Image (spheres, rainbow, N blue to C red):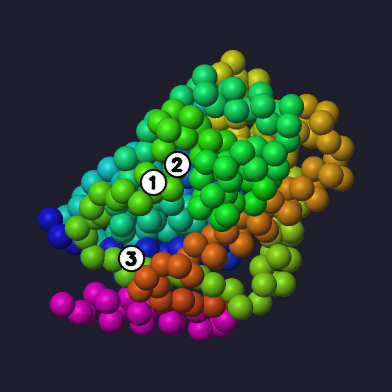
Amino acid sequence: MMAKAVLLLGPTASGKTALGVKLAHTFNAEIISIDSALVYRGMNIGTAKPTEEEKEGVPHHLIDIRDPFDSYSAADFFKDCERLIEEITARGRLPLIVGGTMLYAKALKDGLNQMPSSDLNVREEIEWQARQLGWPAMHEKLSEVDPQTAHRLHPTDSQRISRALEVYRQTGKPISYYQSQQNKGSDHTFLTLGLLPKNRKLLHERIEKRFLMMIQAGFLDEVKRLMTDERFDRQSPSMRAVGYRQAIDYLLGEIDYDRFVLAGIAATRQLAKRQMTWMRSMPQLVTIDPFEEDANALATEHIKEFLSSN
């Protein structure tokens, strides 16, 4: 069944949740979360997971569907989202896909590549080498075998450097090769709205304020609870989420409190920058400044035009 759906993408702390709920009320929509961290149960404060009050009675999907140390991939999201789009449409409602995981958005619109699954032994070997040499040195190793990927990664982007080296060591082919081998994306029709703040300073202030509020709300206690799980692995995707990996460093005594706060804020700002860079490369992206008073009205008009078009 061909359906119409709206993607509402944006960087962290740009107001996606609140705007998504407003639009859901306007268009009789159900929200599908497109956020790789919100899928995990027990990760509430550090992910800014919407509360029941913030949801305002709007159905939300793909939240709290995995334990923190279970896997959830872009392929899993693609399958789940396709199913939900059809189910929500069959109920006579609009699928509104809200979040900031741009890899999932790309998978939905452009299709999935044939990336090999993770190999724990290879990953552990890479992590061991990184502890000896440092991530900038591992970035240099990556540039020797996959200069295209290395060029777009920061030398301290440990998660992506590790994954790129892992793929190369598993297959002998660079990760950029697999990323260029795309399968077909969704058959559904999408309007993609991108929240791109013009006032970068304001976004940075919001990020800092929110991170400090998370700490006051008990973020460190949340991470402590996760660390008591017998399956806890600091290298798991959930624990490498922004904020969580800095909290783990602090709770393990590897950094002091002030450095934890500064590192958490800086990492969140870097995430926002990557999200906005990725959005700008998306074709047919309709941009809206979320901090302008008419953001809701603009989004509403774009969705009305989209739904009335053939």
- In three-dimensional space, the C-alpha distance between marks 1 and 3, rounded to whole angstroms, equals 30 Å
Q: Which residues are magenta?
A: 292-310
Q: Label 3: state its secondary structure.
A: strand
Circle 2: residue type: Pro
Which residue in the structure is indicated by mark 1?
Answer: 177
Q: Residue at x 37, y 70 (%)?
A: 283
Mark 3: give few (<14), some (14-19) or many (20+) Cα within 10 Å. Answer: many
Which dot marks residue 6?
3
**Distance Cα–Cα, label 1 vs label 2:** 5 Å
Q: Position of residue 270 (x, y in %)?
A: 66, 56
Q: Where's residue 96, x and y in %?
A: 35, 61
* Residue 32 part of the magenta segment: no
Task: Name the image quarter holding residue 116.
Answer: top left
Q: What amino acid is found at the position of numbered circle 3 in the picture?
A: Val
User: Comparing marks 3 and 2, which lies closer to the viewer?
Assistant: 2
Residue closest to the far left: 1
Q: Residue at x 68, y 45 (%)?
A: 156
Q: Residue at x 59, y 74 (%)?
A: 197
| Nearer to the camera, 274 or 260 | 274
